Amino acid sequence: MALNVLQNKLKSLAELKQIRDQLRKAGKKVVFTNGVFDLLHRGHVEYLEQARALGDVLLVGINSDASVKLVKGDWRPLVNQEDRAMVLAGLSAVDYICYFDEETPQNIISTLLPDVLVKGGDYTIDKIVGRDVVEAHGGQVVTIALTPGISTSELLKRMARLIKQGKISA
């Protein structure tokens, strides 16, 4: 059952482009966001729910394992791309998922031209990759406030402290 969910939601960029074209013809408002989504937590779920509420369909670009290594370093991701995609596919807020190998989602955004481009509140609008392309095509760019005190980085720091204190073993 779970693999069917992933198969139904995980698409190549070419497949997602066809879906996007069909959605555009149907007058649907398409929202796009992207991220690593390593160690999925409450903050991710709240963020994706809020992003989905901005339109009819939510497309999520996931950094591939190779992309994560470029962005975060050789020791990341902690969870491989298929497992990260499987967890995201299980969320009702997520309609479709696509991997990207590049350092940024510029190519996906330029290909899909979403109606709404969403990033977390840790970004300023002027620093969001793809903003220029989306706005040039009449779309909008939105930031969503992060859930205070909850992030993958904070979880990793907490685990490191607990290991150092001997409360958990590595």
Image (cartoon, rainbow, N blue to C red):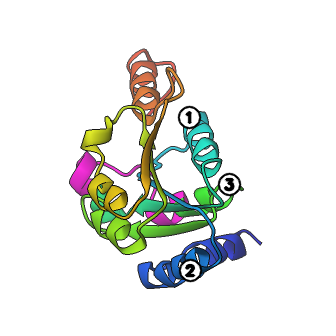
> How far across and how far down the image is residue 157, in percent?
39, 25
Residue 2 image-quadrant placement: bottom right
> How far across and how far down the image is residue 39, in percent?
50, 44
Per the rendering, the mark at residue 43 is: 1
Q: Nearer the viewer, mark 1 or mark 2?
A: 2
- Magenta stretch bounds: 69-84
Separation (CA) of disc 2 from disc 3: 19 Å
The residue nearer to you, when weighing 82 against 142, is 142
Determine the secondary structure under disc 2.
helix
> Viewed as shown, does residue 94 lie left or right of 73?
right
- Quadrant position of the C terminus in the picture: top left
Q: Does the rendering let one see residue 74?
A: no
Q: Are marks 3 and 1 in contact (CB under 8 Å)?
A: no
Q: Which residue is mark 3?
A: 91
Tag 1: amino acid: Gly
Please rate how many residues cluster around mark 2, counting C-alpha atoms within 10 Å: few if below 14, some from 14 to 19, many from 20. Answer: some
Q: Earlier in the sequence, mark 1 or mark 2?
A: 2
The residue shown at (67%, 54%) is 93
The residue shown at (36%, 59%) is 134
Tag 2: amino acid: Ile
Q: Does the rendering let one see residue 27?
A: yes
The residue nearer to you, when weighing 128 against 133, is 133
- Quadrant position of the N terminus in the picture: bottom right
Residue 66 image-quadrant placement: bottom left
Tag 3: amino acid: Leu
Q: Which residue is mark 2?
A: 19
Determine the secondary structure under disc 1.
helix
